[in-house]
Amino acid sequence: GEAPPLAPSRTRAFVAVQNGCDHACTFCVIPQGRGQSRSLAVPQVLGEIEAHLTAGAREVVLTGIDLTSWGHDLPDEPRLGT
């Protein structure tokens, strides 16, 4: 897909590292609308962060629908803190 737009300089940038959800909470439509949990691979995350920093962002926020599930679908199942 296309890379998200870069944040203007001196602002906060957001990088969506995870999308979707594997939980089936009765009150939530996210699994039907966004599908199963999918993680952005480490090289892609680092590439997006680098692009934002190069463009002048001073802060990068990692985002996701179920951020704690990031990495469960990647090889070696890396943890977000790593």
Image (cartoon, rainbow, N blue to C red):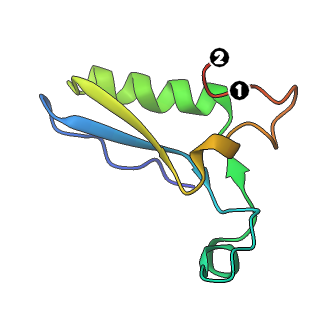
The residue positioned 87% from the left and 31% from the top of the image is 75
Image position, residue 20 (x, y; %)? 65, 62
Query: Nearest the camera: 4 or 38?
Result: 38
Image position, residue 80 (x, y; %)? 63, 28
- In the rendered view of the protein, which quadrant contains the N terminus? bottom right
The residue positioned 29% from the left and 41% from the top of the image is 6
**Badge 1, how many Cα within 10 Å: few under 14, some, many 20+?**
few
- Secondary structure under the numbered disc 1 in the rendered image: loop
- Give the residue type at disc 2: Thr
State the image quarter where residue 61 is shown. top left
Query: Nearest the camera: 60 or 6?
Result: 60
Query: Nearest the camera: 43 or 68?
Result: 68
- The answer to whether marks 2 and 1 mark residues whose Cβ atoms lie closer than 8 Å is yes
- Secondary structure under the numbered disc 2 in the rendered image: loop
Separation of marks 2 and 1 at Cα, in angstroms: 5 Å
The residue positioned 55% from the left and 57% from the top of the image is 65
Q: Which mark is residue 82?
A: 2
Image position, residue 8 (x, y; %)? 16, 38
Image position, residue 25 (x, y; %)? 69, 74
The residue positioned 71% from the left and 52% from the top of the image is 38
Vertical position of residue 13 compared to residue 79: above or below: below
The residue that mark 1 highlights is: 79
